[in-house]
Image (cartoon, rainbow, N blue to C red):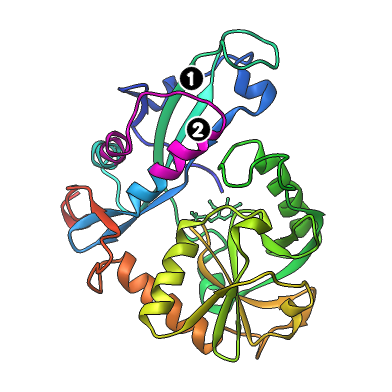
Amino acid sequence: MAVQKTDKIWHNGKLINWDDAQLHVLSHVVGYGSSVFEGIRAYETSQGPAIFRAHDHMQRLVNSARIYRMDFPYSVDNLVNVASELVRVNKMGACYIKPIVLRGYGEVGVNPLNCPVETYMACWKWGSYLGPEALAQGVEVCVSSWTRIAPNTLPAMSKAGANYMNSQLIRIEAIKNGYAEGIALDADGHVSEGSGMNIFLVHNGVLYTPPLAASILPGITRDSIVTIAADLGLTVKEAVIPREMLYIVDEVFIVGTAVEVTPIRSIDKIQIGKGSMGPVTRKIQDEFFAIVNGKKADRHNWLTHTNTPVAAAR
Ligand SMILES: Cc1ncc(COP(=O)(O)O)c(C=O)c1O
């Protein structure tokens, strides 16, 4: 999807013009993948755009950087304020917000420690990731031939740019073979996650999702779905999931900032349930969108209002 330019990007404490957010080609991040980042959505509400779980995303960014010993001077609260400011100055409605912490231009060897750590944040307008029909009709996915990053290789809990080389292999293979997305297994052959999303299975009314030890990113949408499911009186279990479970359960859906709550119609051409959105997925998706769009009370304090005028006044 082509990015839609906005006015300003934030860099190390200052707002700069979109076109001025440039890097030297020998920046450490270019040669060695040394970046951590976040992907966050702001949703349009009746009080203007509100950022979904801003603090949790920024805390994960701080954690991701800590794992790689990237020191940067911004607190979670600082970063949340910057995200709100960015939405305001760019007069955004619903949008995607991407903070990036990277190793910049300095030395050119593998050792990153003498390269400056740079912090950027950008936002842009973004719709549904797999298309609006995907949210309603569901998508067809495959199990990837690529294994998810193994424990103690690239840390899966850090949302690092380098991890997305693995994600790219999963996604490219899926697209080339005519699927919307690929589901990767972990190094033990158990269900892990998609290229940029977590997964839930529903069987006999109970929800199952792989644990952190299955090389997953600790998804903030995943956490939200666990909370929403509990609110709805559903049982959720973190469980090691054998691949073949995918083919015999009643419902499967994928979740993430990008895909939100997207039903799966089939896996490796084996139909899941009735081949359309199942009743549990529908209940969870309805509740999720009602909360993020401010149509239901924000009972878990998940929304940060940005004090940006509502759509009609922008
Ligand atoms: C590999 C991976 N897993 C899971 C997720 C879902 O995480 P979240 O719900 O925090 O967006 C993402 C998206 O960021 C991801 O890239």
Q: Residue at x 38, y 50 (%)?
A: 56
Question: 110 or 182: which is nearer to us?
Answer: 110
Numbered mark located on residue 117 in the image: 1
In the image, ligand 1 is in what quadrant? bottom right
Q: Residue at (33%, 38%) from the top-left corner?
A: 76
Q: Residue furthest top?
A: 107
The residue lying at 56 percent from left, 10 percent from top is 114
Q: Which residues are magenta?
A: 59-83
If you read the primary sequence from the N terminus, does the residue marked by circle 1 or circle 2 appear first?
2
Give me the C-alpha separation between circle 1 and circle 2: 10 Å
Q: Horizontally, is 78 left or right of 24 in the view?
A: left
- From the top left corner, tell me how far across and down residue 119 is, in percent: 43, 26
Question: Which residue is pictured at 71% across the width and 69% down the height?
Answer: 141
Circles 1 and 2 in contact, beta carbons < 8 Å: yes
The secondary structure that dominates the magenta segment is helix
Instruction: Tell me, yes or no, if residue 164 can be seen here.
Output: yes
Q: Position of residue 180 (x, y in %)?
A: 68, 64
Q: Which residue is mark 2?
A: 65
Return the mark for residue 145.
none
Rendered view: 267 above or below 256: below
> Which residue is at the front of the view, 31 or 265?
31
Taking the magenta stretch, the answer to whether it contains residue 303 is no
- In the drawing, does residue 279 fall left or right of residue 87? right
Q: Nearer the viewer, mark 1 or mark 2?
A: 2
- Secondary structure type for disc 2: helix
